[in-house]
Image (cartoon, rainbow, N blue to C red):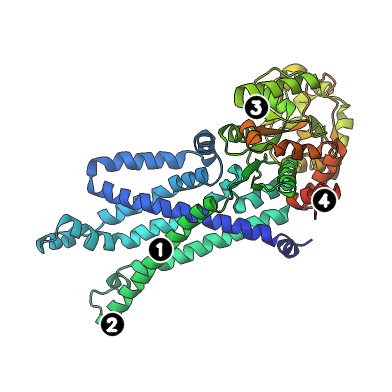
């Protein structure tokens, strides 16, 4: 399937992501303007606060956006709010600086003449200084608007949608068509934003500046004033659209709504869509899909805070990463402890196992295993000083991941290079790295003919998939438990691996794969 065929095939999803991206961008830029311009006016008028305010704005620019998410998710939750908040913070600096520079750069002789005519400070500000500074202010808004288009792609990490979701999903599944389907509209949107704001900038520029003369005929002056009013009307319309989008998204939800989340890899996306379709197909509940949120801690914080009502996680992940227990391999014990501790500590119900165990594995290319005589993880200790290891970011910081694996097997690789998503499969297949972490049900293992190593010391804990549901949600919608139990017996390691393969290797949409599976199993109607 070429790119154009792919765009036609996924046109609904691309259009939805584009609309979300535009809404988030306009809302963030409007908020930044409403904050940045008045703040710029303030620091231009009150000298002793300009340096502290500028210093704070510069510090904010220096903080990585993903670090901001780490701080803000426990406070603001997930979705549009943290995304808009962060984009506003990054958009403030160019607007603030240009507002301050534009107001301070006006010829003092003009200001003296205005005072000599008897104008008050407010009249000087709004009739002289602000109109003359508008071109410089608009240049700052123009920079902020273009930057915001690119920055809004981070919305994919907190379930706010946008074109970043397509880009990140494409990276996860090595799907170049999906990456381009997100990147090209994002680029075109940035160019369009630059063009539109540039036209507004031209319209608000004083006539004498544009024509290079202070002598302007009456007809031209009237025309320019009319155009300026049209520009301000357009700006007001954009503000109304942005505010209306935010309000509308909150009002359009019905009374019976639950939010289903997922982590940021293929299997989780399929399971998230599967639960959502299953619920909507067998109840009158509307599901708000919060797919591709991020790693374990993002989803766990989201369900604790009530930002999502349910998602699928794994018993071993919950036992070690969420609850801080030491890794053990007893499947039944791990399940019982997870069920009891999550209920007692966080009010989260753990439902029954879905039927498959997606445990961690270390994987290598068969020719590399043969060259070094490796069949199990213990064999790595004989040659680990010659090998490069590429875990995922989450694995490298977990006790049931690299931190515990290193101690149990006594490993010390020549180099550790962290890779995420489908990139690590390409890297090991191209011999750019030697050992990677994977999940036992990953479809890309078969697609790249990658072999897995035996966990001969039984380090990895069982990772059986289980739905996690807020107890408040179960009390409000008791029918949920029965609906989710419909999946029991329909999923296995082989079935899940095949579903993942359809997305990772065949390029199908996770939502489509999930829906088709439920229809085939007669769990929902077509």
- Pointer 1 residue: 235
Residue 331 vs residue 7: left or right? right
- Percent x, y for residue 55? 35, 39
Residue at x-position 52% and y-position 63%:
191
Looking at the image, is mark 2 or mark 1 nearer the viewer?
Answer: 1
- Percent x, y for residue 485? 78, 36
Q: Residues within 10 Å of mark 1 (few under 14, many from 20)?
A: some
- Pointer 3 residue: 397
Residue 322 appears anywhere in the view: yes
Q: Name the quadrant of the N terminus.
A: bottom right
Say which mark, if any, is on residue 219: 2
Q: Residues within 10 Å of mark 2 (few under 14, many from 20)?
A: few
Q: Name the quadrant of the C terminus.
A: bottom right
- Pointer 4 residue: 519
Relative to 220, residue 446 above or below: above
Residue at x-position 62% and y-position 58%:
16
Relative to 356, residue 412 above or below: above
Looking at the image, is mark 4 or mark 1 nearer the viewer?
Answer: 4
Mark 1 and mark 3: span between their CA atoms? 47 Å
């Amino acid at each position: 399937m070429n790119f154009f065929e792919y765009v036609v095939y996924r046109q609904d999803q691309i259009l939805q992501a584009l609309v979300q991206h535009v809404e988030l961008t306009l809302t963030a830029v409007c908020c930044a303007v409403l904050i940045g311009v008045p703040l710029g006016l303030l620091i231009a008028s009150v000298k002793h606060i300009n340096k502290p305010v500028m210093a704070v704005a510069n510090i904010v620019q220096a903080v990585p956006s993903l670090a901001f998410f780490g701080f803000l998710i426990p406070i603001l939750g997930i979705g549009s709010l943290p995304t808009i908040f962060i984009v506003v913070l990054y958009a403030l600096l160019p607007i603030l600086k240009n507002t301050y520079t534009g107001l301070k750069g006006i010829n003092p002789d003009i200001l003296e003449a205005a005072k000599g005519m008897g104008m008050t400070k407010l009249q000087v500000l709004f009739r002289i200084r602000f109109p003359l500074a508008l071109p410089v202010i608009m240049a700052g808004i123009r920079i902020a608007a273009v930057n915001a288009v690119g920055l809004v792609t981070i919305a994919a990490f907190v379930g706010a949608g946008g074109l970043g979701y397509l880009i990140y999903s494409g990276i996860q599944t090595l799907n170049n068509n999906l990456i381009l389907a997100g990147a090209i509209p994002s680029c075109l949107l940035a160019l369009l934003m630059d063009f539109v704001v540039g036209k507004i900038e031209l319209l608000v520029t004083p006539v004498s500046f544009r024509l290079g003369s202070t002598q302007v005929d009456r007809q031209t002056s009237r025309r320019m004033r009319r155009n300026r009013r049209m520009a301000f009307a357009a700006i007001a319309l954009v503000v109304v659209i942005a505010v209306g989008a935010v309000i509308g998204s909150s009002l359009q939800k019905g009374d019976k709504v639950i939010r289903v989340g997922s982590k940021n890899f293929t299997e989780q996306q399929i399971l998230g869509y599967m639960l959502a379709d299953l619920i909507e197909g067998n109840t009158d509940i509307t599901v708000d899909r919060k797919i591709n949120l991020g790693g374990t801690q993002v989803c766990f914080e989201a369900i604790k805070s009530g930002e999502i009502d349910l998602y699928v996680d794994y018993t071993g992940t919950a036992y070690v990463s969420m609850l801080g227990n030491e890794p053990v391999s007893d499947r039944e014990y791990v399940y019982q402890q997870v069920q009891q501790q999550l209920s007692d500590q966080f009010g989260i119900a753990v439902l029954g196992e879905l039927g498959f165990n997606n445990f961690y594995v270390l994987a290598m290319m068969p020719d590399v295993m043969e060259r070094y005589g490796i069949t199990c993880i213990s064999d790595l200790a004989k040659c680990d000083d010659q090998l490069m290891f590429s875990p995922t970011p989450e694995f490298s910081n977990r006790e049931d991941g690299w931190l515990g694996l290193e101690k149990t097997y006594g490993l010390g690789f020549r180099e550790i290079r962290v890779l995420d998503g489908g990139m690590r499969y390409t890297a090991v297949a191209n011999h750019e790295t030697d050992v990677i972490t994977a999940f036992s049900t990953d479809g890309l293992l078969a697609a790249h003919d990658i072999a897995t190593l035996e966990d001969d010391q039984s380090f990895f804990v069982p990772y059986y998939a289980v739905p996690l549901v807020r107890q408040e949600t179960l009390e409000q919608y008791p029918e949920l438990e029965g609906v989710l139990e419909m999946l029991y017996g329909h999923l296995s390691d082989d079935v899940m691996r095949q579903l993942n393969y359809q997305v990772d290797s065949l390029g199908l949409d996770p939502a489509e794969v999930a829906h088709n599976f439920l229809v085939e199993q007669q769990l929902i109607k077509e």
